[in-house]
Amino acid sequence: MAAAKWVVAWSHEGRIRSEAAFACLAGVNPITASSGNTVRHRLNRGGDRRLNSALHMAAITRMTYDTETCDYVEKRRAEGKTDTDKEI
């Protein structure tokens, strides 16, 4: 189901020219949320919500079953990152 949502979002060759454009379309690109001396980012909450959901489910599935992804997540957790940190 997730792959079908990606194909529909892609729709035709040339629509998405880069990974950054795909992230923007899915609503997972970082947006500056800085204030004063604080520099931080948050995720874009716009974009195609169905595509965003499909990407989320693919990430959760990989975090559960893919050994390379599990190793990466464990490494980041050992560094002190949590699941809610946007850098995982």
Image (cartoon, rainbow, N blue to C red):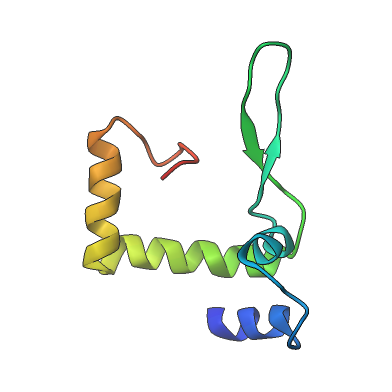
Query: Measuring 73% from the left and 12% from the top, which residue is drawn there?
Result: 36
Query: Measuring 46% from the left and 41% from the top, which residue is drawn there?
Result: 87
Q: Left or right of 49: which side holds 81?
A: left
Q: Quadrant of residue 2?
A: bottom right
Q: In this picture, is 80 found above or below 67?
A: above
Q: In this picture, is 73 found above or below 26?
A: above
Query: Measuring 72% from the left and 58% from the top, which residue is drawn there?
Result: 24
Q: Quadrant of the N terminus?
A: bottom right
Name the spot of residue 78 as percent of width and height, x first: 22, 36
Q: Is residue 81 visible?
A: yes
Name the spot of residue 58 as percent of width and height, x first: 46, 69
Q: Left or right of 55: which side holds 83?
A: left
Q: Quadrant of residue 60?
A: bottom left
Q: How many marks?
A: 0
Q: Left or right of 59: which side holds 38?
A: right
Q: Quadrant of the C terminus?
A: top left
- Foreground pick, 72 / 20: 20
Name the spot of residue 26 as percent of width and height, x first: 68, 63
Q: Is residue 1 visible?
A: no
Q: Left or right of 11: which side holds 70?
A: left
Query: Measuring 71% from the left and 34% from the top, which residue is drawn there?
Result: 32
Q: In this picture, is 72 found above or below 6?
A: above
Name the spot of residue 79 as percent of width and height, x first: 27, 33
